[in-house]
Amino acid sequence: MIGIYLITLVFAGIGMFVQWRLKSKFQEYSEIGLANGLSGREIADKMLRDNGIFDVRIISVEGQLTDHYNPADKTVNLSPDVYYGRSASAAAVAAHECGHAVQHATAYSMLQFRSAMVPVLSIANNFMPIALMIGMMLLYSTGNKLVLTIGVAMFALATLFSFITLPVEFDASRRALAWMSQRNVVTPPEHEMAKDALWWAAMTYVAAALGMLAQLLYYMSLLSGRRSND
């Protein structure tokens, strides 16, 4: 049990550092106004139209770094700092979320695969914590590994989902940066700031995926160790 707590603590620390770095970068770049004076909402609208997308709404949602694209209702959801912001960070986030809308419109395979996993993963996530907890108790008290095996299988599915998310996020950033450069939406220095901000945003997903992989390997080692002792 100590092992899983140590792994969780280590990757929680990494995740906190990445989140802190991301927020500091966005704060730094949010203070630098765009040369073109466009807001995040205007940039999002321009990118969607340039890609022939006219059925996606752009709306403002509460919170900080709560920006996301919802394929279910075709909405680009931007936090107030991005929606109204006229900075390099606002431009980066707005274009990135529109990158997901472009993925959806062009049937990007990894996004489709990820979306197909969501219903199954939602069900698995409801039972996974209980299965893992009870499974570990049974493994140590009775040697029964069935429940833990089921829990680990569900955790493996969640881990797979986190890794499938990575190419989706990196591709959305690639599309955003390429479009901003091609359409001269940002100057070269602004492009570098947007690229840096999106890189740190991507690192939050990388840290989360690696943390889940480490926990998965730990659970699998428990099953493997128990089997070798049987």
Image (cartoon, rainbow, N blue to C red):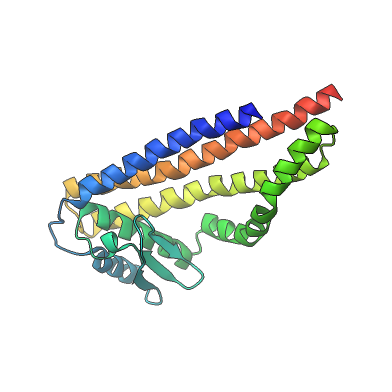
Residue at horizontal 61 percent and vertical 35 percent from the top: 215
Counting every numbered tag in the picture gives 0
Residue at the far bottom in the pictured view: 55
Please name whichever residue, 1 or 201, is drawn nearer the observer in this view of the structure. Answer: 1
The answer to whether one can see residue 52 in this image is: no
5 to the left or right of 203:
right
Residue at horizontal 66 percent and vertical 30 percent from the top: 1
Residue at horizontal 56 percent and vertical 28 percent from the top: 6
Above-or-below relation of 129 to 213? below
31 to the left or right of 152:
left
Above-or-below relation of 195 to 118? above
Above-or-below relation of 45 to 93? below
Which quadrant would residue 189 be assigned to in this image?
top left
Residue at horizontal 71 percent and vertical 42 percent from the top: 133
Please name whichever residue, 69 or 20, is drawn nearer the observer in this view of the structure. Answer: 20
The answer to whether one can see residue 69 in this image is: yes
Quarter holding the C terminus is top right
Residue at the far top in the pictured view: 229
Above-or-below relation of 2 to 195? above
Q: Position of residue 60 (x, y in %)?
A: 33, 69
148 to the left or right of 13:
right
Which quadrant would residue 145 be assigned to in this image?
top right
Please name whichever residue, 192 or 62, is drawn nearer the observer in this view of the structure. Answer: 62
Q: Position of residue 75 (x, y in %)?
A: 42, 70
Q: Position of residue 228 (x, y in %)?
A: 82, 23
Q: Position of residue 147 (x, y in %)?
A: 79, 43
Which quadrant would residue 159 be assigned to in this image?
top right
